[in-house]
Amino acid sequence: VITNLVSTIPYMGNMIVQWIWGGYSINNATLSRFYSIHFILPFMISMMVMLHLYFLHSTGSSNPLGLKSDYNKIPFHTYFTWKDMYTFMLFFMILLMIILQYPYMFGDPDNFIPANPMITPIHIQPEWYFLFAYAILRSIPNKLGGVIALIMSILILYTLPLISMKMNSMAFYPLNQSCFWLFINTFILLTWLGAQPIESPYITISQVMSIMYFLYFILIPLISLHWDKIMYNY
């Protein structure tokens, strides 16, 4: 399903899909490629985490006032080591409990149906952490427009650090705080809508929530700019 989204690219879509598959249909080459990607990806993520920690210790983290934080430093150990270990162990225990006691909590019942190449499941949905993007994809009738919205719904999250604010914390921006919690509620609703059947009224609600999702990234820079003018003029 995901690889078929590439087929919406004009002129070259089908050729790219066949290149990804390694043939004219999903075969052993396709499975080997995707298995290799999923095996290598965790190591790449681990490397990025290590780079993040390296630069964090070298330059320091940001603070709400936007001042340089490398003037007054304290040792990482033991102040933050035990704090991070406590958080790590807490989440590790929660993950362990889910794996050992409730392994199918986040699974889909359709996964237990034996695969049949002649029958397409009626209700296809991705994993729960991609349901918000799937709801945005389904809310747009045009296939190419839906794929573009799906990609943008994920890539647009990377623009958040680029939003210019005089202060590095939303504690000084009450309107931003309200918009942020509205965005969180929109995200949760989109996640829920992604697991619902493609029928009314879920389609209409998904379209409204999709507009609110993208509207957040347009309003936040404008509100921040306006609020900075208010604070620094008075």
Image (cartoon, rainbow, N blue to C red):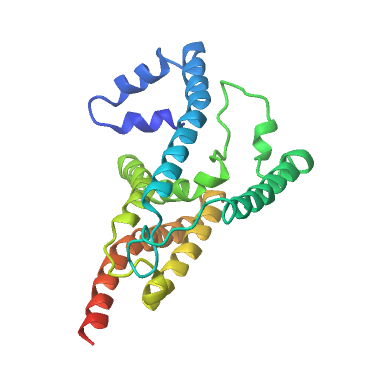
Place of residue 199 in the rendered image (x, y in percent of width and height, measured from the top left): 51, 52
**Compared to 16, does 66 lie above or below?**
below
Instruction: Please identify the quadrant where the C terminus is shown.
Output: bottom left
Is 126 situated left or right of 18 in this image? right
Residue 165 vertical placement versus 27 (above, below): below
Q: Nearer the viewer, residue 122 or 216?
A: 216
Q: Position of residue 81 (x, y in %)?
A: 59, 50
- 50 horizontally vs 165: left or right: right
Q: Residue at x 41, y 28 (%)?
A: 3
Residue toward you, 138 or 176: 176
The spot of residue 42 in percent (x, y) is 51, 31
Question: Image height check: is 43 above or below 98?
Answer: above
Closer to us: 67 or 4 = 67
Q: At 35% from the left edge and 30% from the top edge, which residue is drawn? A: 6
Residue ID at (35%, 17%)? 19
Q: Quadrant of residue 66?
A: bottom left
Occupied quadrant, residue 143 = top left
Outermost residue, bottom side? 234
Residue 193: percent from left, percent from top: 53, 54
Q: Is residue 19 left or right of residue 47?
A: left
Residue drawn where x is 35% and y is 64% of the image = 216
Give the tally of numbered discs.
Answer: 0
Q: Nearer the viewer, residue 171 or 193?
A: 171
Look at the picture and state if 19 lies above or below 132.
above
